[in-house]
Image: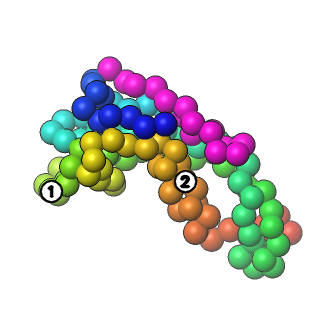
Amino acid sequence: MKVMLRKVTSTPLDFEVKFNEITFKGYLEYYKGKLILLKANIVGPLVTECDICADEFIMKLDENVEFFISDGIYEDDNSISLDVVESLDGNIDIDELLNSEIELIKSDYHSCESCK
Ligand SMILES: [Zn+2]
Protein backbone atom coordinates (compact mmCIF):
# COMPACT_ATOMS: atom_id res chain seq x y z
CA MET A 1 0.00 0.00 0.00
CA LYS A 2 1.52 3.29 -1.14
CA VAL A 3 0.45 6.65 0.20
CA MET A 4 1.19 9.99 -1.43
CA LEU A 5 2.49 12.13 1.41
CA ARG A 6 1.05 15.42 0.25
CA LYS A 7 -2.42 13.89 0.45
CA VAL A 8 -2.05 13.34 4.17
CA THR A 9 -3.83 16.05 6.15
CA SER A 10 -4.54 16.71 9.80
CA THR A 11 -7.48 14.34 9.50
CA PRO A 12 -5.99 10.94 10.35
CA LEU A 13 -5.69 8.60 7.41
CA ASP A 14 -6.24 5.01 8.52
CA PHE A 15 -4.31 2.13 7.05
CA GLU A 16 -4.06 -1.58 7.57
CA VAL A 17 -1.63 -3.94 5.88
CA LYS A 18 -0.79 -7.57 6.47
CA PHE A 19 2.36 -9.60 6.16
CA ASN A 20 1.67 -13.30 6.63
CA GLU A 21 -0.25 -13.36 9.91
CA ILE A 22 1.04 -10.01 11.10
CA THR A 23 -1.22 -6.98 10.99
CA PHE A 24 0.09 -3.44 10.86
CA LYS A 25 -2.72 -1.06 11.63
CA GLY A 26 -2.73 2.62 12.41
CA TYR A 27 -2.94 6.05 10.90
CA LEU A 28 -0.97 8.84 9.27
CA GLU A 29 -1.52 12.42 10.26
CA TYR A 30 0.04 15.68 9.12
CA TYR A 31 2.19 17.21 11.86
CA LYS A 32 4.06 20.29 10.68
CA GLY A 33 6.57 21.37 8.06
CA LYS A 34 7.50 18.28 6.06
CA LEU A 35 6.57 15.92 8.83
CA ILE A 36 3.83 13.35 8.98
CA LEU A 37 3.18 11.36 12.11
CA LEU A 38 2.70 7.61 11.87
CA LYS A 39 1.13 5.80 14.80
CA ALA A 40 0.45 2.12 14.52
CA ASN A 41 0.29 -1.23 16.18
CA ILE A 42 1.97 -4.45 15.02
CA VAL A 43 0.13 -7.56 16.12
CA GLY A 44 0.58 -11.19 15.21
CA PRO A 45 2.81 -14.21 15.39
CA LEU A 46 6.38 -13.86 14.14
CA VAL A 47 8.59 -16.87 13.54
CA THR A 48 12.09 -16.10 14.73
CA GLU A 49 15.16 -17.85 16.07
CA CYS A 50 16.17 -18.21 19.68
CA ASP A 51 19.51 -16.48 20.33
CA ILE A 52 20.51 -19.16 22.81
CA CYS A 53 19.52 -22.56 21.36
CA ALA A 54 18.96 -21.39 17.73
CA ASP A 55 15.60 -23.16 17.57
CA GLU A 56 12.77 -21.49 15.74
CA PHE A 57 9.91 -20.30 17.87
CA ILE A 58 6.89 -18.07 17.52
CA MET A 59 6.90 -14.69 19.15
CA LYS A 60 3.58 -13.02 19.76
CA LEU A 61 4.00 -9.46 18.66
CA ASP A 62 2.06 -6.60 20.13
CA GLU A 63 4.12 -3.49 19.54
CA ASN A 64 3.22 0.13 19.32
CA VAL A 65 5.22 2.14 16.85
CA GLU A 66 5.32 5.87 16.48
CA PHE A 67 7.59 7.89 14.22
CA PHE A 68 7.67 10.69 11.72
CA ILE A 69 7.88 10.46 7.98
CA SER A 70 9.55 13.40 6.28
CA ASP A 71 8.46 14.39 2.79
CA GLY A 72 12.01 15.02 1.53
CA ILE A 73 15.25 15.34 3.42
CA TYR A 74 14.71 16.24 7.03
CA GLU A 75 16.96 18.83 8.66
CA ASP A 76 17.09 18.06 12.31
CA ASP A 77 16.15 21.04 14.45
CA ASN A 78 16.02 19.02 17.69
CA SER A 79 12.41 19.98 18.29
CA ILE A 80 11.02 16.48 17.96
CA SER A 81 11.75 13.41 20.01
CA LEU A 82 10.73 10.66 17.62
CA ASP A 83 12.65 8.94 14.84
CA VAL A 84 12.27 10.33 11.34
CA VAL A 85 12.05 8.22 8.20
CA GLU A 86 12.78 10.18 5.05
CA SER A 87 10.89 9.72 1.82
CA LEU A 88 12.62 11.11 -1.25
CA ASP A 89 9.91 10.43 -3.83
CA GLY A 90 6.91 11.87 -2.01
CA ASN A 91 5.40 8.45 -1.35
CA ILE A 92 5.50 6.09 1.53
CA ASP A 93 5.12 2.36 1.13
CA ILE A 94 3.36 1.00 4.21
CA ASP A 95 4.23 -2.63 3.37
CA GLU A 96 7.89 -1.67 3.19
CA LEU A 97 7.65 0.07 6.56
CA LEU A 98 6.13 -3.05 8.07
CA ASN A 99 8.94 -5.16 6.63
CA SER A 100 11.61 -2.93 8.09
CA GLU A 101 9.84 -2.91 11.47
CA ILE A 102 9.75 -6.71 11.42
CA GLU A 103 13.47 -6.85 10.54
CA LEU A 104 14.15 -4.48 13.41
CA ILE A 105 12.21 -6.65 15.85
CA LYS A 106 14.00 -9.76 14.57
CA SER A 107 17.40 -8.14 15.06
CA ASP A 108 16.69 -7.66 18.77
CA TYR A 109 17.68 -10.28 21.28
CA HIS A 110 15.11 -13.06 21.67
CA SER A 111 15.00 -16.29 23.60
CA CYS A 112 12.44 -19.07 23.45
CA GLU A 113 10.30 -20.23 26.38
CA SER A 114 12.65 -23.06 27.37
CA CYS A 115 15.70 -20.77 27.47
CA LYS A 116 14.06 -18.06 29.55
ZN1 LIG B 1 16.02 -21.36 23.06
Report the magenta stretch's main SS: strand
**Residues at circles 2 and 1 in contact by the CB criterion of under 8 Å:** no
User: Is 39 covered by the magenta stretch?
Assistant: no
Residue at image coords 27%, 47%: 89
In three-dimensional space, the C-alpha distance between marks 2 and 1, rounded to whole angstroms, equals 25 Å
Residue at image coords 56%, 62%: 103
Crowding around mark 2 (Cα neighbors within 10 Å: few <14, some 14 to 19, many 20+) is few
Residue 105: where, in percent of width, then height? Answer: 58, 60
User: Is 22 covered by the magenta stretch?
Assistant: yes
Mark 2 lies within 8 Å of ligand 1 (Cβ measured):
no
Q: Quadrant of residue 113?
A: bottom right
* Colour convention: rainbow
Q: In this orientation, does residue 29 appear? A: yes
Query: Would you name the residue on which mark 2 appears?
Result: 99
Q: Amino acid at mark 2?
A: Asn
Give left or right: position of 60 versus 71. right
Under tag 2, what secondary structure? Answer: helix
Mark nearer the N terminus (2 vs 1): 1
Q: Residue furthest top?
A: 11
Q: Quadrant of residue 47?
A: bottom right
**Magenta stretch in the rendered image:** 11-25
Q: Judge whether 96 appears above or below 23 on screen.
A: below
Query: Along the line of sight, which residue is nearer the eye, 59 or 113?
Result: 59
Query: Would you name the residue on which mark 1 appears?
Result: 75
Q: Amino acid at mark 1?
A: Glu
Residue 25: where, in percent of width, then height? Answer: 54, 34
Give left or right: position of 54 versus 22. right
Q: Residue furthest right?
A: 114
Crowding around mark 1 (Cα neighbors within 10 Å: few <14, some 14 to 19, many 20+) is few
Circle 2 or circle 1, nearest the eye: 2
